[in-house]
Image (tube, rainbow, N blue to C red):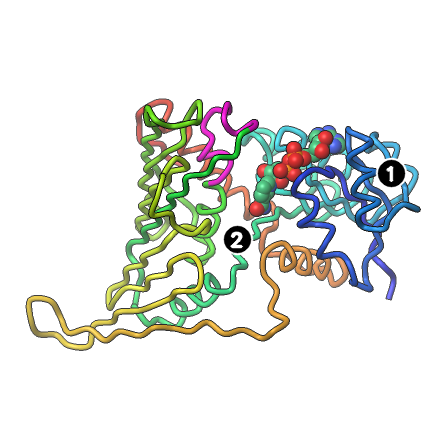
Amino acid sequence: MEKIKVLHVGCGGMSWAWLKPLEGRDNVEVVALVDLNLETAKERAKEFKLEGIYVGTDLEEALEATKPDVVFDCTIPEAHEPVTLAALEAGCHVLGEKPLAHSMEAAHKLLAKASEADRIFAVTQNRRYTRTARRTRALIEEGVIGKVHTIYADFFIGAHFGGFRDVMDHVLLLDMSIHHFDLLRMLSGGLKANSVYCNEFNPASSWYQHGACADALFVMEGDLRFNYRGSWCAEGQNTSWNAAWRIYGEKGCISWDGDDELSLERVTGDQGFVRQLESTNYEVKHPQDYEDGHDAVITEFLDAVQKGTEPETIATDNIHSLAMVFATIESANSGQLVKL
Ligand SMILES: NC(=O)c1ccc[n+]([C@@H]2O[C@H](COP(=O)([O-])OP(=O)(O)OC[C@H]3O[C@@H](n4cnc5c(N)ncnc54)[C@H](O)[C@@H]3O)[C@@H](O)[C@H]2O)c1
């Protein structure tokens, strides 16, 4: 089997989550590491025993010198547009970090370029591969609660990052909520949003400059309601990073704590003020070699490149998760309901 040649660009904090899963794969060869900061790229090369490969600061030079098959883009959001354009221009398939792009305009431009170049362009939405999220989706598909009509997600973390997040606008919606909106789309079977009303705020005690909290009410396709509450300045009683979920259908409710707690209450009778319910707690077991997170996204992407299949987080679909983020921001700014 021919090895897939990978150029990795953006060697900062998250690059570990990309380079680590590549170790030991016999279908991949990392041929170049690129970062605007040469020292950062060199450091990563040393840590991953890749000192012999091309290490540099100029993406176009690196593309020309190493002729990779794919580019892994782990740069900052504002750089996703120029990096992806250059990679597609050079005939590479691209797997990029979330978010797909820093604006809807840039996102549409990248989709058009990928289509013109006939290359796969996918986005890393690692949280949708969480094993208990997959089990939750499977229960919905099995019909255990009947047709789903309302989904609630609560995200409460008191996160003291320091750095750029403390001073950026719409910090929660832009940097984090994309994961929850994308999870909602996976759990709902890929539904798109029709409209949203969003109230964004920053409590007086918040250590962020802007938008640490948001409440958003979405109407999805099929009239499914999605009620989202998020806070990055919630001190105490924190939820999972995946948020805590309640999914109501015509016959019951599935509750997932965002980690490994998954339970169900289902109506079994048709009498009484509150109908008789049967409870089930699920122990989510998976094979030892079950992959989630970045491993799962990377495996699926490399398979797609080798077999010509379509990865789940292909940009043509992921743009509908991104659109939910920009619609919440538009609603928060205008105070109006926004139609998508
Ligand atoms: N999927 C997840 O769970 C998750 C978690 C955190 C961050 N992220 C995403 O990962 C990406 C990177 O985040 P990070 O925390 O590693 O940031 P970072 O700032 O630590 O690293 C980014 C690196 O990209 C380099 N860079 C910037 N522009 C470049 C360009 N044009 N060409 C080459 N190199 C460039 C910078 O020099 C820096 O070393 C972001 O898109 C972020 O949203 C994803």
Which residue is drawn at the image coordinates 82% and 49% (left, top)?
69
Front residue of 22 and 86: 22
Q: Quadrant of the C terminus?
A: top left
Could you tell me which secondary element the residue under label 2 belongs to?
A: helix
Front residue of 22 and 104: 22
Q: Are discs 1 and 2 less than 8 Å apart at CB?
A: no
- Badge 1 amino acid: Val
First to last magenta residue range = 163-176
Give the mark, 1 or 2, whose residue is nearer the N terminus: 1
Q: Which mark is residue 40?
A: none
Which residue is drawn at the image coordinates 43% and 47% (left, top)?
192
Residue 16 showing in the rendered view: yes
How far apart are the alpha carbons under marks 1 and 2? 30 Å
Q: Which mark is residue 127?
A: 2
Q: Quadrant of the N terminus?
A: bottom right
The quadrant where residue 7 appears:
top right
Q: Is residue 55 left or right of residue 275?
A: right
Is ligand 1 closer than 8 angstroms to the Cβ of mark 2? Answer: yes
Q: Is residue 92 left or right of residue 168?
A: right
The quadrant where residue 218 appears:
top left
Magenta segment's dominant SS is helix
Front residue of 198 and 209: 209
User: Is residue 266 on the magenta stretch?
Assistant: no
Q: Position of residue 194 (x, y in %)?
A: 37, 42
User: Is residue 167 on the magenta stretch?
Assistant: yes
